Image: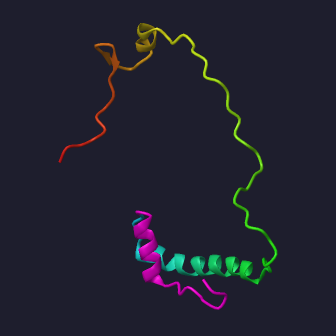
Amino acid sequence: MSQKEEVKVDEELVREIASLARLDLTDEETRTFVPQFQDILKYFSILNELDTENIPPAYLSSANKSVTRADKVEESVPTQEFLANAPQAKDGYVVIPRVLIEQ
């Protein structure tokens, strides 16, 4: 995006963003978000004024490295003891409510 290019924030753009975010906004909420989005974009446009010519890209926000450890095999909780804490069990398994609904 060039420095002069501005995004036009209107109700249509807010509805499109809400749709992508799977939000169902009322007309009043949509109108409320228009000036808020405009303010956010104005605030971020300040970054366009910064001179970043001699600044190297920051690929990582931290110089920290991941610390790994060797896997260690440990004894598991016995099945019967584990199932004793489950709300419902059947045939050695924990019973949970159905997640997928067939249509």
Query: Whole-percent x and y of residue 4?
Result: 65, 91
- Left or right of 4? Residue 90 is left
Q: Identify whether 33 is placed above or below 102.
A: below
Does residue 27 show up magenta in the picture? no
Closer-to-camera residue (16/76): 76
Query: Whole-percent x and y of residue 41?
Result: 63, 79
Magenta residues?
1-22
Q: Identify whether 83 is placed above or below 26.
A: above
Closer-to-camera residue (100/71): 71
- Left or right of 59? Residue 14 is left
Q: How many marks?
A: 0
Residue placed farthest to the left in the image? Answer: 103
Q: Quadrant of the N terminus?
A: bottom right
Residue placed farthest to the bottom in the image? Answer: 4
What residue do we see at 57% from left, 15% from top?
Answer: 73
What residue do we see at 41% from left, 72% from top?
Answer: 26
Image quarter of residue 36: bottom right
Closer-to-camera residue (90/3): 3
Q: Identify whether 52 is placed above or below 58.
A: below
**How is the model colour-coded?**
rainbow
- Left or right of 101? Residue 63 is right
What residue do we see at 49% from left, 85% from top?
Answer: 10
Image quarter of residue 19: bottom left
Does residue 12 show up magenta in the picture? yes
What residue do we see at 71% from left, 35% from top?
Answer: 67
